[in-house]
Amino acid sequence: MKRQNVRTLSLVITTFTYLLIGAAVFDALESRSEQAIKNSVDEMRVDLQTKYNISNEDYEWIEQMVIEYTPHKAGPQWKFAGSFYFATVVLAMIGYGHSTPSTVAGRAFCMLYAAIGNTTITLIILNTNANHVPLGIPLGIVMFQSIGERLNKGASIVIRNLKKICRCKKTEATELNLMTATSVLSSIIMTSGAAVFSSYEGWTYFDSFYYCFITLTTIGFGDYVALQNDHALQNKPGYMALSVVFILFGLAVVASSINILVLRFMTMQAEEMHREDTDMGP
Amino acid sequence: MKRQNVRTLSLVITTFTYLLIGAAVFDALESRSEQAIKNSVDEMRVDLQTKYNISNEDYEWIEQMVIEYTPHKAGPQWKFAGSFYFATVVLAMIGYGHSTPSTVAGRAFCMLYAAIGNTTITLIILNTNANHVPLGIPLGIVMFQSIGERLNKGASIVIRNLKKICRCKKTEATELNLMTATSVLSSIIMTSGAAVFSSYEGWTYFDSFYYCFITLTTIGFGDYVALQNDHALQNKPGYMALSVVFILFGLAVVASSINILVLRFMTMQAEEMHREDTDMGP
Ligand SMILES: [K+]
Ligand SMILES: [K+]
C-alpha cells in the first residue's frame, strides 16, 4: 500500500478510536444525570397535568408553543442589533442557534451569506497575505488570521524591547517566547471574558468559562448564549459591542496561536526533510 | 503606515461592512415574520392560560420544564450511540447543541476533549502530510483534509483514464478538471444527503438541504438535527451510521475543494511574485 494511503488510513483509525473513547466517557459521565433529570421532569409533568387537568394532546401543543416562543423571550432577535449579532455568529461559524431564520428567504440568504462570506474572505487572505499566513486556514477563522499575525508581530516587538531593557544578550523574540505570550494572552482573554459574562449574565464562573471556551473554539452549542436576558440586544449597546468584540478579538488571538504552532511545525518539517536528504547521500 | 498593517485594516473594514450588510438583509427578511410569530404565540398563550386558569408563575415553571425536557423527547442522548454522535459533532466543531453536558464533570471533559482532539489531530496532520496538505487548516476540519487530499488524488487518476479513453491529446488532469470534479461531488453529496434526510426526518427538501449545508459548513445551528425522532439513536443503527458517515465523508469532500482552491491560489501567488521579481529588474 502506498505510504500516503497508509497515513490517511491511520489518521482515520485514530479519529474513530478517539470518537469511541469520547463516547465511552460521555456515556459514563452524563447518562446517570440524564436519567435523573428525565425522571424528575416526568414526575413534575404528571403533577402539572393532574393539577390543571390538561389533556395529553394539549400538553404536546403547549410544548410546541413554548419551544417556538423561546427566542422571543429575549426580545426582538432580528432587529438591527440582533441581526448583526447573528451575522457575526454565522461568519465566525459559531452558529449558536439561539435564533435561526424562520422564513425560506431568510434561510436561503443565510446559506448564500455564509458561502460568499467565507469564499471572499478566503480569497482576500490568500491574495494579501500569502507570505505570512499559513494557507488554507479555517474557513470561519480565516479572517482573524491576519489580525493574529499582526498580534504576533506586535508581541515580537514588545518582547524584543523588554529583553533590551533587561540587557539580555540575545534580544530576538524566540518562538517559545511568542508561544508563551499568546498562551498568556489567550488565558487572559478567556479568564477575564469569563468574569465579564459571569457578571452580566449571572452564570457561575465555571459555566461562563465553558461559554467562552465553546465560543472561541467555534463549536457554539448555544446552551449558554450572551445577550439573551433583559432585552440586552436593544437596551445594552455597550455590552452588545463588547460581546461582538470578544468574539472577533478572541478568535484573532486563537488564530495567532495557531499561526505560531503552524510556523513551528513547518520549520521542524523542513529541518527533518533536510536531515533525510543529507542522510540518504549517495 | 506599513503595507501589512494597511492590509489587515482593510480586511477588518471589509469584514465589518459585510457584517453590516448581513445585518440589514436579515433584519429586512426576518423581522416581520418574527413579530407575526410572536403575536400568534402570545395569543395562544393567553387562550391557554384562560382555558386552564394557569397562573403566570406556574406558566413560567412550565416553560422551564418544557425546555429542560426537549432533548429527552428524542430518547436517551447519552447512551453509547448518542455519546458517539455527540463526540463526532464536537470534534467536527459543528456543535448542534441539541443535547449538551449537564454535569460539571461532563462540561470539563467536553472542553478537554475538544482541546486535545484538535491539537493532537493538528499535530498528526502536520507531521504526516506536510508536503501535500496546506498547513494551518481548520482545527475542526483538519482531520478530513487528509482524506480530501486522497480524494483529489483518486479524482486525478479517474480523469486521466477518462481522457485516455476519449483519446484526448493531453491526458493530465488540470486544476479546472479537479475543481469541477469536487464541485460535482459536493453537489451530489448535498443533494442526495438532502433527499435521504428529508425522507428519514420528514423535512421538506429545502429544509433538509438547509440542514446539510449548515452541517457541512460546520455552523451547526441545531434548528434541524438528525436522529431526534422515534428514538432513532437506539432503534435505527443503520441510519445512525449513515448520519455519522455523512458528516465525516461530507467534510472530507469540502476539505478537498478547499485543498484545490488553496493550491490554485498558491500557484497564482507564486507566479505573481515571480512576475514582480522579473519586472523590478535592475
Ligand atoms: K453550533
Ligand atoms: K459551530
Image: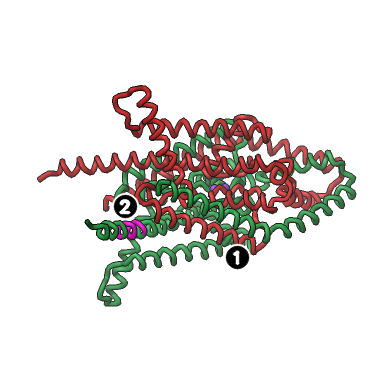
Chain colours: A green, B red
Q: Is residue B90 above or below residue B198?
A: below
| Residue behind mark 2 | A132
Q: Is residue A204 above or below residue A86?
A: below
| Residue behind mark 1 | A205
Left or right: A153 as drawn, with respect to A6:
left
Q: What residue is rendered at 36% in x and 67% in y?
A: A176
Residue A206 position, x and y percent, is 60, 64
Task: Name the quadrant containing residue B221.
Answer: top right
Residue A136 position, x and y percent, is 39, 46
Q: Which residues are magenta?
A: A265-271
**In front: B226, or B24?**
B226
Amino acid marked by disc 2? His
Task: Name the quadrant containing residue B205.
Answer: top right
Q: Which tag, 2 or 1, sits closer to the chain's start?
A: 2
Q: What residue is rendered at 60% in x and 54% in y?
A: A20
Q: Chain of mark 2?
A: A
Q: Chain of mark 1?
A: A
* Residue neighbourhood size for the residue with mark 1, other residues' Cα within 10 Å, grouped as few (<14), some (14–19), many (≥20): some
